[in-house]
């Protein structure tokens, strides 16, 4: 990039970071979306605002061969955010890259299986832990991070902090 192109890119990149913060994105999302803009800029050695659809296809074709689909999706979302909020352009990502649909069957235990797990557990504290996870629908990490201070006796709420992606409500009924 020449000096004026670099200045334009620097300005757009800063605007991108500002827009990410203004839209309330979490730090990990900001890092991923900012990395997507830096990565495509380095790939073509030009600012992403000057890329055409064929260049975007070329970039994602290369990215698919060297990175996981989760990275491809983060880059796709980061660039889509860049186009929408920084450039005020719509970006039809389906025409460019679409990750394969993976159908996963979640491991949901029946009430009988849950009862069996709890009854086979010898220590009372682990039984209480499993009962808490199951009855409140908590993830393992959310249950492990609970403290006595998270229980509000007055409102009968348990405060779940820093759930997955910060999207979990701050209170869950016991």
Image: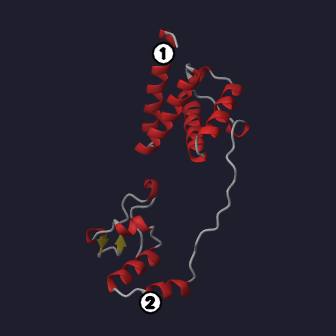
Q: Residue furthest top?
A: 3
**In the picture provided, is 157 more to the left or to the right than 15?**
left
Front-most of residues 164 and 56: 56
Mark-to-mark CA distance, 2 and 1: 64 Å
- Is residue 168 depicted above or below 17 in this figure? below
**In the picture provided, is 101 more to the left or to the right than 163?**
right
Q: Is residue 91 visible?
A: no
Q: Residue furthest left?
A: 149
Q: Quadrant location of residue 123?
A: bottom left
| Residue linked to disc 2 | 119
- Residue at 45% x, 53% y is 165
- Closer to the observer: label 2 or label 1? 2
Front-most of residues 23 and 145: 145
- Residue at 69% x, 43% y is 98
Mark number displayed over residue 6: 1
Quarter of the image containing the C terminus? bottom left
Front-most of residues 104 and 29: 104
Horizontal and vertical percent position of residue 7: 46, 15
């Amino acid at each position: 990039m020449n000096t004026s192109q670099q200045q334009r890119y620097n300005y757009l990149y800063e605007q991108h970071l500002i827009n990410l913060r203004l839209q309330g994105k979490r730090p990990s999302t900001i890092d991923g979306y900012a990395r997507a803009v830096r990565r495509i800029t380095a790939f073509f050695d030009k600012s992403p605002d000057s890329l055409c659809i064929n260049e975007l296809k070329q970039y994602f074709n290369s990215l698919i061969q060297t990175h996981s689909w989760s990275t491809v999706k983060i880059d796709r979302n980061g660039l889509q955010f860049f186009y929408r909020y920084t450039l005020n352009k719509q970006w039809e990502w389906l025409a460019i890259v679409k990750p394969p649909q993976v159908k996963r069957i979640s491991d949901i235990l029946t009430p009988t299986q849950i009862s069996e797990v709890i009854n086979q557990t010898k220590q009372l504290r682990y039984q209480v832990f499993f009962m808490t996870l199951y009855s409140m629908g908590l993830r393992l990490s959310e249950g492990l991070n609970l403290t006595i201070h998270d229980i509000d006796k007055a409102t009968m709420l348990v405060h779940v902090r820093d759930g997955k992606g910060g999207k979990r409500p701050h209170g869950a009924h016991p």
